[in-house]
Amino acid sequence: MTDAPMTAQAASTATAGDILSSHLTAQAGAFLRALPTAVGEVGARPGAAVVPSAGTADLLRAVRRIGGLLHTFGGTFEQAWAQESRTELRWLLNLLALEPGYVRRAARLLGALDALNGSEADGPGMLAGHAGSPKARALLDRQLTLARTRAHSTVLQELRSARLHALADRMTLLVAEAPLLEAAGGRAGAVLLPQAAAAFGALTAGAQQLPLRRAATPYGGDGLRRLGAVPAARGAVDADAALAADDAPWHRVRILVKRARYALEVCGRPAVELDELDEVLGRHQEAADAAVTAATAARTPRITPATAYVLGVVHADQRLEVEAARYAFGRRWPELPPGLDGWLEIPPAEGWGHTPAPRTA
């Protein structure tokens, strides 16, 4: 591996600590600026927005980047501090994603059911006029509204907790000085590039575990009928576990894509292709989660067979969305540069260590 692409922009003078401190200071500042706005937004809204509002989106963006940086370049920080920080950031990330996740899932499922039940100019949907559609829609709406309301109450309670205040204090100290190890005094290229390369190695290894050959057919019905090397299903609970095991490697690769993207940002390289992969895998996860919700609703006691049938069709529709996302990933993945060296050959965005402008949520 060569660090020549980096030296042209940093003149070999920046240390790893300089680069990481600059990046962390920017993201911790964004965290502290967005936190009051996000807390106010959560308290003011009943949870009707499909995407997080501006303050929450900015806060989530900062949390993901700080967590990704601490994971990828963790060898340059005090280990106990980095691990504690990542744990607390993950807690806040999961907390803030709860309510918007339910809202997006409701929009996805109800929209899919309305499309299947509609009568368009090019022909009616396969559930058009079906007796179970109205009750299925009402059941999904009721269950997801209840889940969203509970999530909203949980978020409100946790955002007033001492745990959040402690995390805010941790970010305030991070703005002033990051707890770096002695190794961070080395040249940026010599210290950071091997750690960034490890993030890309993990991504490559994760992608190699995916059944890309099975996902290479558009509208892959085989992906719906055969889940690959997962335990045989025995009943409804085991069927859910089999689907979860089939989806898990894809969800893992999405996390690895994010880490690789944040590593590239520290290196000052554009990552548009990784942004696109992240969006594709985001659709995959949203559809997989929506399918689980539809299957769970279909097992609600005392519903009519017609209602259960409609929910089964919605479940199958979302699993087709899962297969479509896998197909899109399989088409794009081979076109990406192999490993970190290929990405370093791309002209830098603004220079080594540049913090990119925030993306629109």
Image (spheres, grey):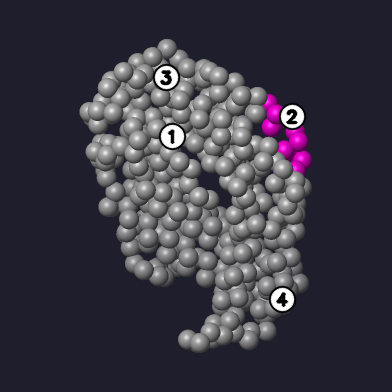
**Residue pictured at 31% horizontal, 18% vertical:** 13
Q: Earlier in the sequence, mark 2 or mark 1?
A: 2
**Residue pictured at 40% horizontal, 70% vertical:** 219
Which amino acid lies under the numbered mark 1 shown in the image of this protein? Thr
Give the spatial CA distance, label 1 vs label 3. 15 Å
| Quarter of image, res 132 | bottom right
The residue singled out by tag 3 in the image is 17
Give the spatial CA distance, label 4 vs label 1. 50 Å
How dense is the environment of label 1, judged by Cα within 10 Å: few (below 14), some, or many (20 and up)?
many
The residue singled out by tag 1 in the image is 355
**Residue pictured at 48% horizontal, 57% vertical:** 284
| Residue 272 percent coordinates (x, y) | 37, 48
| Residue 358 percent coordinates (x, y) | 48, 43
The residue singled out by tag 2 in the image is 162
How dense is the environment of label 2, judged by Cα within 10 Å: few (below 14), some, or many (20 and up)?
few
Magenta highlight range: 154-166
Give the spatial CA distance, label 2 vs label 4. 43 Å
Q: Earlier in the sequence, mark 1 or mark 3?
A: 3
Q: Earlier in the sequence, mark 4 or mark 1?
A: 4
Nearer to us in this view, 149 or 294? 149
Q: In which quadrant of the rendered image does the N terminus lie? A: top left
